[in-house]
Amino acid sequence: MTQTDRPKPTAARELIGDFAPRLVELTDGTLYDEVWNREVLSRRERSFITVAALVAAGNFEQLPWHLRYAVENGISQQEISEAIMHLAFYASWPKAMSAINAAKTVFADAFPADVVD
Protein backbone atom coordinates (compact mmCIF):
# COMPACT_ATOMS: atom_id res chain seq x y z
CA MET A 1 0.00 0.00 0.00
CA THR A 2 1.42 3.36 -0.98
CA GLN A 3 1.15 6.55 1.04
CA THR A 4 -1.68 7.78 -1.21
CA ASP A 5 -3.60 4.48 -0.87
CA ARG A 6 -3.78 4.70 2.89
CA PRO A 7 -7.13 5.74 4.38
CA LYS A 8 -7.32 9.24 5.80
CA PRO A 9 -6.86 9.00 9.57
CA THR A 10 -10.09 9.48 11.47
CA ALA A 11 -10.52 10.11 15.19
CA ALA A 12 -11.40 6.45 15.69
CA ARG A 13 -8.43 5.27 13.62
CA GLU A 14 -6.05 7.49 15.57
CA LEU A 15 -7.43 6.41 18.96
CA ILE A 16 -7.95 2.67 18.52
CA GLY A 17 -6.93 1.70 14.99
CA ASP A 18 -3.91 -0.30 16.08
CA PHE A 19 -5.91 -2.16 18.74
CA ALA A 20 -9.38 -2.61 17.20
CA PRO A 21 -9.25 -2.11 13.42
CA ARG A 22 -12.65 -3.75 12.82
CA LEU A 23 -14.33 -1.38 15.29
CA VAL A 24 -12.74 1.50 13.36
CA GLU A 25 -14.16 0.11 10.10
CA LEU A 26 -17.64 -0.12 11.61
CA THR A 27 -17.37 3.33 13.19
CA ASP A 28 -16.14 5.04 10.05
CA GLY A 29 -18.04 3.01 7.46
CA THR A 30 -21.36 2.10 9.00
CA LEU A 31 -21.87 4.81 11.60
CA TYR A 32 -20.39 7.89 9.94
CA ASP A 33 -20.61 7.03 6.24
CA GLU A 34 -24.08 5.46 6.38
CA VAL A 35 -26.07 6.38 9.49
CA TRP A 36 -24.92 10.00 9.74
CA ASN A 37 -25.68 10.54 6.04
CA ARG A 38 -29.26 9.27 6.05
CA GLU A 39 -31.68 11.89 4.78
CA VAL A 40 -34.51 11.87 7.34
CA LEU A 41 -32.51 13.70 10.02
CA SER A 42 -29.93 16.39 9.35
CA ARG A 43 -26.40 16.17 10.73
CA ARG A 44 -27.36 19.03 13.06
CA GLU A 45 -30.30 17.04 14.43
CA ARG A 46 -28.16 13.91 14.74
CA SER A 47 -25.57 15.92 16.68
CA PHE A 48 -28.23 17.13 19.13
CA ILE A 49 -29.48 13.58 19.61
CA THR A 50 -25.97 12.21 20.06
CA VAL A 51 -24.95 14.86 22.60
CA ALA A 52 -28.19 14.27 24.53
CA ALA A 53 -27.67 10.50 24.49
CA LEU A 54 -24.07 10.82 25.71
CA VAL A 55 -25.09 13.16 28.53
CA ALA A 56 -28.06 10.99 29.57
CA ALA A 57 -25.91 7.85 29.59
CA GLY A 58 -23.02 9.58 31.37
CA ASN A 59 -20.58 8.85 28.54
CA PHE A 60 -18.43 11.90 29.11
CA GLU A 61 -15.26 10.53 27.51
CA GLN A 62 -16.83 10.81 24.04
CA LEU A 63 -18.67 14.07 24.78
CA PRO A 64 -15.93 16.62 23.93
CA TRP A 65 -15.43 15.20 20.43
CA HIS A 66 -19.19 15.20 19.79
CA LEU A 67 -19.55 18.73 21.16
CA ARG A 68 -16.95 19.94 18.65
CA TYR A 69 -18.72 18.00 15.91
CA ALA A 70 -22.03 19.57 16.97
CA VAL A 71 -20.52 23.02 16.49
CA GLU A 72 -19.29 21.97 13.03
CA ASN A 73 -22.87 20.90 12.32
CA GLY A 74 -24.26 24.33 13.23
CA ILE A 75 -25.16 24.07 16.91
CA SER A 76 -24.27 27.11 18.99
CA GLN A 77 -22.79 27.32 22.47
CA GLN A 78 -26.09 28.77 23.69
CA GLU A 79 -28.07 25.84 22.23
CA ILE A 80 -25.71 23.28 23.78
CA SER A 81 -25.91 25.01 27.15
CA GLU A 82 -29.71 25.11 26.98
CA ALA A 83 -29.94 21.45 25.95
CA ILE A 84 -27.70 20.39 28.83
CA MET A 85 -29.76 22.49 31.27
CA HIS A 86 -32.90 20.77 29.98
CA LEU A 87 -31.26 17.37 30.40
CA ALA A 88 -30.53 18.14 34.06
CA PHE A 89 -34.21 17.52 34.76
CA TYR A 90 -34.45 14.30 32.74
CA ALA A 91 -31.01 12.68 32.92
CA SER A 92 -29.78 13.87 36.34
CA TRP A 93 -28.31 17.01 37.78
CA PRO A 94 -24.82 15.50 38.28
CA LYS A 95 -24.66 14.37 34.63
CA ALA A 96 -25.67 17.84 33.47
CA MET A 97 -23.03 19.45 35.70
CA SER A 98 -20.36 17.13 34.28
CA ALA A 99 -21.56 17.81 30.74
CA ILE A 100 -21.61 21.59 31.19
CA ASN A 101 -18.03 21.47 32.48
CA ALA A 102 -16.99 19.45 29.42
CA ALA A 103 -18.80 21.92 27.15
CA LYS A 104 -17.20 24.91 28.84
CA THR A 105 -13.75 23.37 28.35
CA VAL A 106 -14.44 22.57 24.69
CA PHE A 107 -15.66 26.08 23.99
CA ALA A 108 -12.83 27.71 25.94
CA ASP A 109 -10.28 25.72 23.93
CA ALA A 110 -11.93 26.17 20.55
CA PHE A 111 -13.47 29.63 20.86
CA PRO A 112 -11.82 31.43 23.81
CA ALA A 113 -13.30 34.84 23.01
CA ASP A 114 -16.84 33.43 22.75
CA VAL A 115 -17.16 31.57 26.07
CA VAL A 116 -19.82 33.05 28.27
CA ASP A 117 -20.00 32.14 31.96
Image (spheres, rainbow, N blue to C red):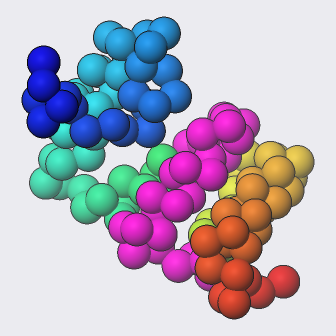
Task: Identify which residue, 68 or 51, lies in the foreground.
Answer: 68
Query: In which quarter of the view is residue 5 placed?
Result: top left
Residue 56 in sight: no
Q: Is residue 21 above or below residue 10?
A: above
The quadrant in which the C terminus is found is bottom right
Q: Is residue 81 above or below residue 46?
A: below
Report which quarter residue 3 is drawn in.
top left
Magenta stretch: includes residue 106:
no
Which image quadrant is residue 89 in?
Answer: bottom right
Direction from residue 113 to residue 88 in the image, left or right = right
Q: Residue at x 62, y 47 (%)?
A: 63
Horizontal side, residue 93 vs residue 10: left or right: right
**Magenta span contains residue 78:** yes
**Where does the image place residue 68, in percent across and percent down from the top left?**
52, 61
First to last magenta residue range: 52-79
Any part of residue 114 in sight: yes
Report the side of 5 relative to 19 (left or right). left
In front here: 10 or 51?
10
Q: x and y percent of residue 1 in the render?
A: 13, 18
The dominant secondary structure in magenta is helix
Identify the residue shown where x is 28% and y is 32%: 28
Relative depth, front residue between 94 and 27: 27
Q: Is residue 114 above or below residue 9?
A: below
Q: Viewer-proximal residue, 80 or 90?
A: 80
Residue 39 rendering spot, x and y as whole percentages: 13, 54
Residue at coordinates 49% horizontally, 21% vertically from top-left? 16
The image shows residue 109 at horizontal and vertical percentages of 69, 69
- In this view, 73 is above or below 26: below
